[in-house]
Amino acid sequence: MASWILVPCLVKLRSEFDMIAPNRDKTSDGSVGDSAHSAEVSDHNPDETGNVPIRDADKINEVHAIDVDVDLRTPGLTMEQVVQFLLGRCRSGAETRLRYIIYNRRIWSASTSWRQQAYTGANPHDHHAHFSSSYETNREASQVSWHLEDVPVALTADDKKWISAEIAKQVKAQVDDIWAYNIGRATGTPSQRADGALVTANLRAGTLTNDQVPKLFDAIEQLTAQVAELKASVASRTS
Ligand SMILES: [Ca+2]
Ligand SMILES: [Ca+2]
Ligand SMILES: [Zn+2]
C-alpha cells in the first residue's frame, strides 16, 4: 500500500510538462520530501503524517508540491515561459489550484496576489521550479487542463519554413480540389474565366441544375475552415 499520494492536480500538471517537453531532463524532479524536508514545514511532506503548513479536510495522506527540472530540452520552450504562463492564469483567476511557485530566486504566492518577490531560501531553485498546490478538496483533486499546450514558444527558422511550406501545400491541394469541381468541365469551356461567366449566367437565369456548384461551395468552405485552423495554430505558437 502506498503510504502517500501526490494530489491529482499536480499529477496532471506534471503530465502536461511531459506532454509539451517529452524529452525533458527529470534529474531535479521531485514530489515527496526527503529527510531534509521532513524536518521542516513543507508541502513536499505527506499531509496526514508529516510536517505541513495546512491541515486539510480529508484523511488522505497527500503531498501538495512538485519540483520540475528546468531543463525542458525543447527548442524555443523555457521554464521561465511556463512559469510566466501559469502566473498569468493565476493572476487572472483562471487558475486557482496553486498556492505558490518558486523559481530562480523568486517566489510568487496566491496570498500576495502573485506579486513577484525575492526568494532567499538556501536553495535558489535554479535547477528546478517548485509548484505548491491548494489543500482545498475540490481544487487539489481537479484534473482539468492546465493548458500548458498554449504556452507561447519561439519558433525556430526551420519551424517557420516548415509551416510556410505546409500552408502552401495544403492551400494548393484545396485549390486544385476546387477546380476539379470546375463547372466548365461539364460544358467543355476550358478557361476559368469562361467557367465563371457561365456560373454567373446560370445563377442569374436561375437555371443551375447540376450538383457541381454545391460541391464547389463545400470545397471553398473546407478551404476556409482549414486556413482558419492553420492561422490559429500558427498564432498560438508565435504570440
Ligand atoms: Ca490530506
Ligand atoms: Ca486533501
Ligand atoms: Zn520543491
Image: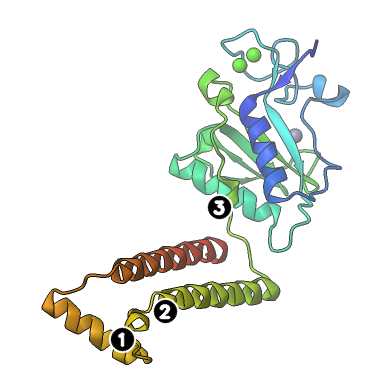
Disc 1 residue type (three-letter):
Asp
As drawn, 128 above or below 234: above
Disc 1 secondary structure class: helix
Q: Which residue is mark 1?
A: 195
Q: Which residue is mark 3?
A: 150
Number of numbered discs visible in the structure rendering: 3
Q: Which badge, 2 or 1, is on the more N-terminal residue?
A: 2
What's the distance in space between the residues labelled 3 and 2, CA to CA?
36 Å
Q: Position of residue 33 (x, y in %)?
A: 80, 25
Disc 2 residue type (three-letter):
Trp
Quarter of image, res 151: bottom right
Q: Which residue is mark 2?
A: 179
Q: Position of residue 101 (x, y in %)?
A: 64, 40
Q: Position of residue 126 (x, y in %)?
A: 78, 49
As drawn, 91 above or below 227: above
As drawn, 135 above or below 10: above
The residue depicted at 53 percent of the width and 25 percent of the height is 139
What's the distance in space between the residues labelled 2 and 1, CA to CA?
10 Å
